[in-house]
Image (cartoon, grey):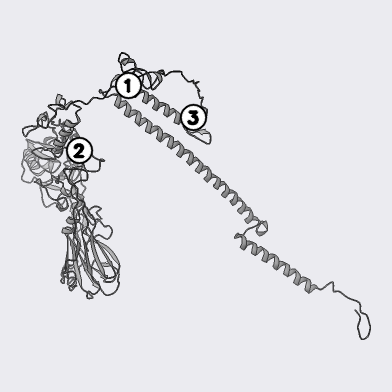
Amino acid sequence: MTDRQTGVTDMAMAVKNNVAAQMALGELRKNNDKLSKDLKQVASGMKINGAGDGASEYAISEKMRVRIRALGQDDENTKKGSDMLHLAEGGIQNQISILRTIKQKVIDANNDTNTETDRMTIQKEINQGYRQLQDIATDTDYNGRRVLLEGNQVVDTIKSWEVKPAAVQVEGSEIDGILTYRQHEATLYDTLDGQPGPFDTFYEWEEKGPTTGGPTIASLGLDASNQLANGVPGTPNTITVDLAVAGSGVDQLDNVGFAAPKDPSYYTYVLTKDKTRDYSAVYHEIDISGCSTLEDVAKQIASSVSNGYVQATAAGTKVTFTTSQIGTSANSTTVAGISRVSSTQSVGGSPAVSAYDGSPAAAATGVFGQNGLVTAGKDTKGTAGVKDLPYSPGNNAQWKWNIASVPDGSGAVFRYNGYGALYLKFTDGSDAYTYSSTDNIATVGRMATADFDVGRVHIHMSGGEFTATTTDADYGATIEHFFSVTDGFAKGEAKSAHAAQPAVPPHDVTYTAVSPLAEAAITNNRAGTDGTPASYTIDLSKSEYQTSDETELEKLITDLTGKAIYPSDRGRGVEFIDKCRKDRNSPLDGEPRASQRQCGCQQGTRSHNENFWDSRPRHNAHRSQKRCNHRGGACQSHAECWRYPCDRCE
């Protein structure tokens, strides 16, 4: 380097050992490496990208990748196996369909209206079906594997073929036998349309005239004097208890217990000479304090034991229990001794009850006093497709009220016959639906969105609109009849007032021990026998019914449709209809719907024909008769209390 003023030239010099610069450069490289690694992790989305990121973690991740690929292949293998099974299932379903057709053909061949030629033709069809089964078994393959065969090799037989100069009957032909028995008739043709034969034609179709004296209802011989015959009633079982074996005197029978029947063991009895005694878990105490002999005790038992399972009678020292059930199934019913140990237990008592002055009142809304019905309900009538029961579909009933301006604190009562009442009070705003068990009153904001049920009526609230809709279109009119609304309610109406009650402490009860009736005194006679049902036969083997005249048969069917054979004493009749039951759970076409059926409940002392929806709770055989005790109207846990009872339903 030369200075322009002085002309002096300087030599260039480089610094080789700047430690601070070298350290800064090293740190820069480290930062670059770390940044590169971080960017790689960000770009790949993985923490471990190589062994440098952690040797053990990298080894674990590689093992996991291998496992994931293996599981993926397992999934692919499973899918392929599933595809193969679906293919096999399709082949088997086709074979089942062919087997059903073969069964149909076998039943058809068994019909006496078929000739031997017809049966030969049917047999050809059956043989063809078996060949199709074999073809399906050999041709159903997946990736070259025949899935319906044990092996994977099929030997195919190829037959030679040639063009014949003239038509000939091939051995095993479908028309085998049709030509042979008509060789003598002139309907055979040597040539037809220029082609050499022989050719045959089928019989000419000839319409026969109508049958005279066809089948009629009168020829069935049905009239009011017909009676069922050949019925033999079954007999009940009897169980004998000999008190002379159970004890030598009245004193020995004191505190002796038995169950009649043994199973179910609801009805338990104890003989006692002191009615002031307490016994644990005993259905009835039989007082024998006035009995002086075993015969007197037998009479006392006979007068005391009569329930739905057995009835008792006395003869000397023996008591005979006769089962209400008849037949051999009643022979398992018997009488057994029971025992109870002496014990002292604390029973009774109740907590103190505070005074309650009754539920609050709610003023009338001025809205629910109006009817509000916008769509009248209609019950479904008849059955579709049955001409003697014309079908008319039902529809739901619907009510609408505008409650946007009802006063704060006003309310109404919504009732559904047989399911209690819902006392509902409205508040300003959009408060959610709540129910207070203390007052038995539900509260909801008049502008709230809410859904709840009152019996079989669904309530929907939204934007100040209050809509009530029945929930079963088949019984729209019936449910509408059961639903009612009262505007406002008085104080104490939702829940009555009651005075305060002090606490009642429990008291001790000493239960007397009970000894079992001696097993040796009990004899199960197993006297129950099965009866033979009575019957009445309608004879259709008469000659007038053996006709193929379609007009006459249709006439008989038309005359019979809608008529019934009905027993005079009790039970359901049999109606002639023109269709069959669709499935075992659906009513017969022509059978009344539930709302039209006669109630077959025999509980009580009368036969009744009450409307199915209005059946009384005492007929416990019907679920629809179970009454909901869930206070507040509808059960909140379910929409159809009558069909799916909750734990508060009887």
Query: The N terminus lies in which quarter of the figure?
Result: bottom right
Name the residue type under label 1: Thr
Residue 434 shows in the view: yes
Query: The C terminus lies in which quarter of the figure?
Result: bottom left
Q: Say which element carries label 2.
A: loop
Q: Say which element carries label 3.
A: loop
Name the residue type under label 2: Asp
Q: Position of residue 116 (x, y in %)?
A: 30, 19
Q: Say which element carries label 1.
A: loop
Q: How crowded is the residue under tag 3: few (<14 C-alpha within 10 Å), some, or many (20+)?
A: few
Report which quarter residue 315 is drawn in: top left
C-alpha separation, residue under disc 2 versus residue under disc 1:
39 Å
Residue 150 is marked as 3
Residue 201 is marked as 1
Residue 578 is marked as 2
* N-term-proximal mark, 3 vs 2: 3
| Mark 3–mark 2 CB contact (< 8 Å) | no
Name the residue type under label 3: Glu
Q: Position of residue 472 (x, y in %)?
A: 23, 55
Q: Is residue 303 left or right of residue 109?
A: left
Q: Residue at x 70, y 67 (%)?
A: 32
C-alpha separation, residue under disc 3 versus residue under disc 2:
50 Å
Q: Residue at x 35, y 31 (%)?
A: 100
Residue 361 shows in the view: no
Nearer the observer, disc 3 or disc 1? 1
Q: Nearer the viewer, residue 180 or 141?
A: 180
* N-term-proximal mark, 2 vs 1: 1
**From the viewer's perspective, is residue 277 above or below residue 494?**
above
Q: Position of residue 152 (x, y in %)?
A: 52, 29
Report which quarter residue 22 is drawn in: bottom right
Q: Nearer the viewer, residue 550 or 191?
A: 191
Q: Is residue 548 left or right of residue 224?
A: right
